[in-house]
């Protein structure tokens, strides 16, 4: 084996070793790297009151209640579990029922999740607004697109 | 294809390529902007904010592509003793850094109205921030060290170590829960983007590539001259 291929092999082996070390670290700390928990993960976990966490899921359909101009109630769900959230503040543009959202806050004594921050989550779908209208006109509009 | 590893051949090809690259980057960039602003529809949810994507996504792709090129050249330089790889490393690192910065700035301009925040420390955003820091370290390493032979090797090794971040940036949205959305365009499935929005995205990507190539030609030629005249 020539010298240059020995060097190539050495470089590639070193990279593989470092990469697997980094991936092992990341894999074993994934709970901390993940930006949010899903509602079913939160319910299974033994989370304590007033501990700051983020929950990500969909805003449940027909769960949104506007109490005052800056005070809202809604449920966040992952289709398996759902959590009641109350929030005082400004909601982002994309926030609506059926849309993904990430909520930052903590549980109070009554199992209500008090949000301090609400982020809307956008999915990977891009579609012209005109297509939405024509799909609605022809009756092909799927409610899950909302 | 010797011009990719031989400085003299590169200079010859670069002289042919420079003007077409410059002209096409200007033309394509304006065509792309025209498509982004006038000939593409509003998104059904984001409205006209979707147009930020036509700058954000190409710059993100090119930030990663630039680093991938530096990685390949670092392997070539270290394993096969091709000094042109060292030239590439010091020439194109700032280009990649600027693409990363454009990606971060345009992304946070999009994030404020859509997510409701300029910045969050989720896996994708953090790994891109790390990519930017790695680029900065490479640039500063290129400016330090008295001895060129030592500097080149240290930089190339650092580029290789930093390349571990590339798959992390790419797959961060699949491996962890992130606020950032997952990939829209992938090889395995039909892209979940409408063709009318795909057109400006592709034009802008090619335009950004041509801008990158144009600046890269200038910087690589300068770097070759500096080395030939033993200025550093």
Image: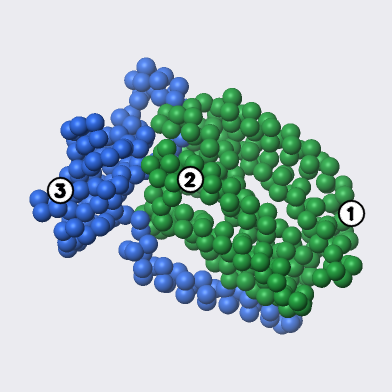
Above or below — where is A124 with respect to B94? above
Q: Which chain corresponds to the colour green?
A: B
Can see residue B214?
Answer: yes
Residue depicted at 44% across the width and 46% down the height: B118
Q: Which residue is mark 1?
A: B12
What's the chain of the residue with tag 3? A
Mark drawn on residue B108: 2
Q: Which residue is mark 3?
A: A112
Residue depicted at 77% across the width and 65% down the height: B87
Disc 2 element? helix
As rendered, which of B206 and B156 lies closer to the eye? B156
For the C terminus of chain A, the image quarter is top left
Residue depicted at 52% across the width and 56% down the height: B128
Above or below — where is B228 with respect to B129? below
Q: CA distance from mark 3 to mark 1?
A: 70 Å
What's the chain of the residue with tag 2? B
Disc 3 element? loop
Q: Which chain corresponds to the colour blue?
A: A
Q: Nearer the viewer, mark 3 or mark 1?
A: 3
Residue depicted at 30% across the width and 47% down the height: A117
Residue B172 percent across, percent down from the top left: 45, 57
Above or below — where is A12 with respect to A104? below
Judge from the rendering whether residue B28 lies leftward or rightward of residue B229; answer left or right.
left
């Amino acid at each position: 084996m020539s010298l240059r291929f020995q060097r190539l092999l050495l470089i590639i082996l070193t990279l593989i070793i470092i990469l697997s070390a980094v991936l092992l670290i990341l894999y074993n700390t994934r709970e901390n790297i993940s930006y949010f928990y899903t509602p079913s993960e939160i319910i299974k976990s033994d989370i304590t009151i007033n501990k700051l966490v983020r929950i990500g899921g969909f805003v449940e359909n027909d769960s949104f209640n506007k109490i005052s101009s800056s005070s809202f109630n809604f449920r966040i769900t992952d289709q398996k579990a759902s959590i009641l959230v109350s929030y005082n503040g400004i909601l982002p543009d994309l926030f609506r029922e059926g849309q993904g959202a990430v909520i930052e806050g903590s549980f109070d004594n009554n199992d209500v999740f008090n949000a301090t921050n609400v982020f809307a989550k956008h999915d990977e779908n891009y579609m012209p607004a005109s297509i939405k209208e024509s799909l609605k006109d022809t009756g092909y509009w799927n409610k899950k697109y909302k | 294809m010797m011009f990719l590893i031989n400085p003299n051949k590169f200079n010859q090809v670069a002289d042919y390529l420079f003007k077409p690259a410059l002209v096409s980057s200007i033309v394509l960039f304006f065509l792309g902007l025209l498509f982004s602003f006038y000939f593409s529809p509003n998104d059904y949810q984001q409205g006209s904010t979707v147009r930020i994507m036509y700058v954000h996504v190409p710059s993100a792709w090119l930030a990663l592509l630039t680093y991938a090129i530096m990685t390949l050249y670092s392997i070539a330089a270290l394993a096969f003793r091709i000094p042109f790889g060292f030239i590439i490393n010091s020439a194109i690192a700032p280009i990649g850094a600027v693409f990363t910065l454009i990606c971060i700035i345009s992304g946070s301009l999009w994030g404020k109205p859509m997510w409701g925040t300029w910045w969050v420390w989720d896996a994708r955003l953090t790994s891109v921030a790390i990519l930017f820091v790695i680029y900065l370290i490479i640039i500063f390493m290129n400016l330090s060290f008295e001895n060129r032979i030592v500097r080149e090797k240290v930089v190339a090794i650092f580029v290789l170590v930093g390349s571990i971040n590339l798959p992390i940036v790419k797959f961060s949205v699949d491996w962890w829960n992130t606020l950032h959305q997952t990939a829209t365009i992938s090889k395995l499935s039909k892209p979940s983007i409408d063709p009318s929005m795909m057109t400006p995205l592709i034009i802008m990507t090619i335009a950004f590539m041509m801008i990158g190539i144009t600046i890269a030609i200038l910087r690589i030629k300068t770097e070759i001259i500096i080395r030939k005249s033993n200025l550093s």
